[in-house]
Amino acid sequence: MAKFEVVMPKLGESIIEATITKWLKNPGDTIEEDDPIVEIATDKVDSEIPSAVEGKLIKVLFNEGDVVPVGEIIAIIDTEPGEGTEDIEETIESAKPERPLVDSKDTKAQDIKPETTEEPQQEAVSSSDRFYSPLVKNIAKTEGIGQAELDKVSGSGKDGRVTKDDLMAYLKTRGEKAQQVDQKPADKPAATAPSAPKVTAPAVTTGAGDEIVEMDRMRKLIADHMVMSVQVSPHVTSYIEVDVTNMVRWRERVKDDFLKREKEKLTFTPIFVEAAAQALKDFPGVNASVDGYKTILRKNINIGMAAALPNGNLIVPVIKYADQKNLIGLAKDVNSLANKARNNKLEPDDISGGTFTITNLGTFGSITGSPIINQPQVAILGLGVIKKKPAVLETPEGDVIAIRHMIILSLSYDHRTVDGALGGQYLQKMQQLLESFDTNRVV
């Protein structure tokens, strides 16, 4: 028998695991090359894993609902079914994961018995329903953290999951507390430091006729991500009003020819993306991330554009290397990603690697807004609606009042690393680029 191991693929630079949501093939099914085998979900996108070979699926190694690290073998395919099948059982046995398969919906983690009793106090198998990644379990074992102690570590991840940073922060305070206890006189009791007040949501009551709608999985993830962003980053929002009359008139004049020549619509979005990318090159502190007390200035300028999905949820596909593309390339990327989002065809790579985000608040007529930062970025640009307004223009003959196309841009930024001066300078650069738009531009 020739076996082929299906592994959990790398789904983006920041994604280390995915949840198996549905097996599309069952053991014994014949599979053609490129047939989808399983549906998976991350905190950013749902996707399918296709088969790279044809053959027969002989074993699945994880159940629906299981969280699987990237690189883990999840299934075995026999590429020569019917030939040399006497070693199938041996292959299946050798491919089994170290932990037993469980039904995550019906079986509690405390029912899982470790196969070995060696150092049971170090085995990071939770006595609750809490999930621990292999990395966290390895760190806990190395540092001598028993299961009872690990269960008490506060987690900042999804559903209170303990991340590597949570555990490292705990180890630091653990060492400091131990040192303080060693240095205290024996006749003085250790002082208990006041803990931060726990934030709890207010109780909600329902009345007659109220309808309760359960959030779907994606909306739950969005909700958790938004709460996390506000807790992590001190948000500040700055605003600037911009006269985009030249840009609007130019687009109106060239859009039909552009459509005929390029077979692509020319919307306002790629024009704003182009200006945003140019401004980021001048102010790289806005194209950054924060890691503890370090600011990471990103080399690449990858601009995400928030897009509404047909089901009402939100997703952020990313235009890679936006500063290196001309307006035609940006228009093609914007249209392609928007179409993929509407048809639920985005791939994991389409939504990974963003360094800065733009959200169009004006789609439904909003004048402006203060969007929430898309972590781990440090800023997000909001585009209000473009409206005709009376404005004062300075001319050689004196000031005049004219009808102009105006827009309010808002920039929400992380005050840990971006101050008002930098945020204001970035918006001012955007204003300069858009108001000086060349009406004779050839595209």
Image (cartoon, rainbow, N blue to C red):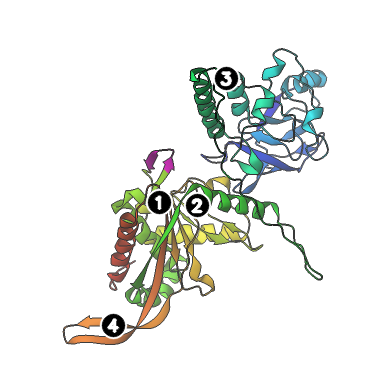
Quadrant for the N terminus in the image: top right
Q: Which range is magenta?
A: 290-297
Indicate the amino acid at tag 3: Glu
Q: Determine which quarter of the picture holds residue 300.
A: top left
Residue count near mark 3 (Cα–Cα under 10 Å), binned few <14, some 14–19, many ≥20: few
What residue sits 72% from the left and 22% below the top? 98
Mark toward the start of the polypeptide (3 vs 2): 3
Q: Distance between the residues labelled 3 and 1?
A: 35 Å
Residue where numbered disc 1 is placed: 415
Residue where numbered disc 3 is placed: 143
Q: Does the magenta stretch include residue 406?
A: no
Indicate the amino acid at tag 2: Asn
Q: What element carries label 4?
A: strand
Q: How far apart are marks 4 and 2 (CA)?
A: 36 Å
Front residue of 404 and 422: 422
List x then y, in percent, for residue 66: 72, 37
As drawn, is 359 to the left or to the right of 98? left
Residue where numbered disc 4 is placed: 392
What residue sits 60% from the left and 28% below the top? 136
Residue count near mark 4 (Cα–Cα under 10 Å), binned few <14, some 14–19, many ≥20: few
Residue where numbered disc 2 is placed: 374
